Amino acid sequence: MPEKNLPELITLKRLIDEGGRHLEVGTSCTVAMDGRQFPVYTIALGNPSPDVPALGFFGGIHGLERIGTQVVLSFMESLLARLRWDATLHQQLESMRLVFMPLVNPGGMWQATRCNPQGVDLMRNAPLSAVEKVPFMLGGQRYSHHLPWYRGAEGAPMEPESRAVCEIVERELLSRQFSMALDCHSGFGLRDRIWFPHAHTATPIAHLADISALEELFSTAYPNHNYVFEPQSRQYRTHGDLWDYLYLNSDNVFLPLTLEMGSWLWVKKNPRQIFDRIAIFNPTARHRLQRVLRRHLILFDFLMRAASSHGRWTPEGMARKVQHRRALAQWYHS
Ligand SMILES: [Zn+2]
């Protein structure tokens, strides 16, 4: 029996209904596939004033990585439930803006591919090229949309889904003095990683001190966490990274992070899954899925607090220079 709709989209619609008047819901674009129409939803809540900081959560940019969408949905579910009784959450939302785009590439999720229905890898689709050497194929390629990591044709406009991400980021995040984003992926390595730009070059970003301060904040508040923070360029460089592109187009402080959930561990525990395309990117055992869905809630909650309190921890003056030097030694001296 083929599915009638994506379970993730059904959950998202239910959460939108439950959130009711607290949520501002928009449809950034609609993706047509197999006679179906999949909306790409954006959901905003909290204070709409341009004077408050903002935080955005993104998932499902790669259609195969369903767990990315699922962790964002599970955080939304928890927040919406708390909206009914948690006065401290309401206070927090008066001091910040919160944005969700949990399923950027529903067409890719429907057809179980990393790319969108046009065969484009949305995370290689921004008009930005690596200056240094990138890994063959994986770094982004223009040979064919039948092959993975296709960037789209030279000079072509960005795909509607990529444009939708850029529009919401420009409108809701870059317009504010301070904002952060977390984009949830899976599939790389054994550990959960938090990547920050750049992806297109090994040159450090201008806001390295802020990222470093954020990591210290997290590591002192949660000393037993198990994330690896690092610039993406330390693992591999790519063409067309959306977050590099948006970061470089920001006049304000914008710290985009990518959560890369280490899925090889799930496969290691069940080696037969290596032959299953979905299982390589997603935990399939119920207990493992539950563990992943609850594991990242602490991080998500921390990011909300860090965004709304940014004035208390972003380093200034001499402290900023010291922090920058420390970060260079940590991440850029191999
Ligand atoms: Zn991904």
Image (cartoon, helix red, strand yellow):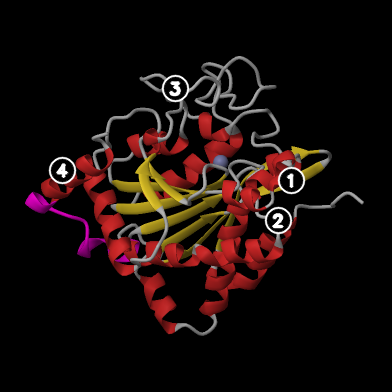
Asked whether mark 4 lies closer than 8 Å to ligand 1, one says: no
Residue 71, disc: none
State the residue at coordinates (66%, 22%).
147
Q: Which residues are magenta?
A: 307-319
Sequence-wise, the earlier of marks 1 and 4 is 1
Name the residue beneath numbered marker 4: 325
**Residue beneath the point at 34% across and 57% down:** 50
Q: Earlier in the sequence, mark 3 or mark 1?
A: 3
Find the distance from the CA under tag 3 to the CA under tag 1: 31 Å
Q: Which mark is residue 134?
A: 3
Q: Name the element at disc 2.
A: loop
Q: Is residue 330 left or right of residue 238?
A: left
Q: Are the residues tagged 2 and 3 within 8 Å (C-beta)?
A: no
Q: What residue is rendered at 64% in x and 37% in y? A: 114
What predominant SS class does the magenta segment belong to?
Answer: helix
The residue to which callout 2 is attached is 284
- Which residue position holds label 1? 272
**Please, what secondary structure does the residue beneath circle 1 have?**
helix
Q: Residue furthest right?
A: 1
